[in-house]
Amino acid sequence: MTTIDNKQLWDSVLGEIELAVSRANFSTWFKNTHIVKQESGIVFVGVQNEFVKEWLVSKHCKFILKSLRDRSESVRGVEYIIATKNIKEERGGAAVQNQKTPYTQELPLQDLYINREDNLNPRYTFENLVIGPFNELAYAASQAVIKHPGFAYNPLFIYGDSGLGKTHITQAIGNHIKAEKSGKKIYYITSEKFTMDYINSVRDNRGNEFKERYRKYDVFIMDDIQFMSGKDKTQEELFHLFNTLHENNKQIIFSSDRHPNHIIGLEDRLKTRFGAGMIVDITTPEYESRIAIIRHKIRSSGFSMSDEQVSFIAGTLNCSVREMEGILNSIICQSRLKNKELGVAELKTLIKNSVLPKKTASAKDVIRAVSEFYNVDESTLFEKTRRKEVVKPRQIAMYILREDFNVSYPTIGEKFGGRDHTTVIHSCDKVKKDMKQNIALVEELAQIRVMLT
């Protein structure tokens, strides 16, 4: 690739990152980064110092790698090197410092490689999975599956809110079977990628090739199946694929952010087939599990923390595993930057600025905050009206109650004038979809969340 190509590639990646992180985070960690070079499918990203390098490795590496691979199929991995931009770089080069201390010294580079043949990330294993009451049923089901794939719990359907470890468990199953049963063919795919493959096969008149491609696997794992909602033709293809695999005792695994019966627009014939296997959920980790997760994270990061600090963080946080790991990364980074152990007061400030609002606020508080923000009367949110100025705040309030406070769909519907739970699900899905296309909406939600803290 030429230097211009590198610049265009990285500018595109930074554009996506800028929409996904706060302005302060982007300015601190990404603003002065650039692609130094590409060699044999490895992208070398230049950063200004060791602290930025360590932060990107621990916090954003997976996202960066995915973003690069979305834009260039030749990318196999990413390394971070300390490099500074100068005049020489403008002419096609970069001033590189410490080239002999690449990212591979901190973490084996192969851990970042997602195998093109099966899409499995080797970092997802049962060895680094923290098990507790919040996920023990899903773990037990997964152990039965790896012992007798295709016969025990087929299909296995795991659901739960985002960031609780569904992908970790489903891919750990694939990685374990891959390691123990070398002859088995395993494949992991998201429902979105499956849908795009189907659309492309129709466009290119490759229908038979599409069918045969997925029917050759012994273990088929599909993530985020809720996004297949309303895609009737794709669901029909999945239905036939499911039947073929199941009839031949091939293991099928699905994950979703909700129970299949609550996925609007999912065909009943698929729901009944999912129900014929094992459906298990993963919940938010309780205090003891949070303690275990925190200790595992700091141990794997080569960091140390007092029991008092661990207890304080576990008692303060009540969020997903992913959010917890993100906050712990912030704590570890701040502690290393300051070269000292953070006190409780500093931890409290850091957590307050990082965590979503806790469940101490009531539905009334959420409705009041949303009403104040959008300057509408609270009572109008309960009315059966489709006026745009009322519908949007109502959907936002439903979304916050569900995402931030984990209130059930039926309960939310009941609080909003006895609406059906399917209406609530539709509202939450619409907000999620709009957030991907409307950065202003993301900012509005952030401001409302601040009002609730």
Image (cartoon, grey):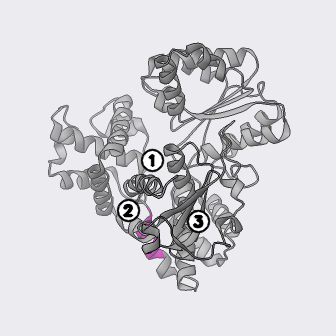
Q: As drawn, which residue projects farthest toward the front?
A: 91
Which stretch appears magenta?
A: 348-355
Q: Position of residue 307 (x, y in %)?
A: 65, 76
Query: Mark 3 is on which residue type?
Result: Tyr
N-term mark: 3 or 1: 3
Q: Majority secondary structure of the magenta segment? A: helix
Q: Is residue 364 visible?
A: no
Viewer-nearest of discs 2 and 1: 2
Residue situated in front as seen by the camera: 25 or 447: 25
Residue, x 50% and y 43% (percent of image)? 70
Is residue 109 shown in magenta? no
**Residue 406 — which label?**
1
Instruction: Identify the amino acid type marked 1.
Output: Asn
Q: Secondary structure at mark 2?
A: loop
Quadrant in which residue 157 is drawn = top right
* Image disc number at residue 355: none
According to the picture, the residue beneath numbered tag 3 turns out to be 80
- Tell me the CA gap for discs 3 and 2: 22 Å
Secondary structure state at the residue bearing disc 1: loop
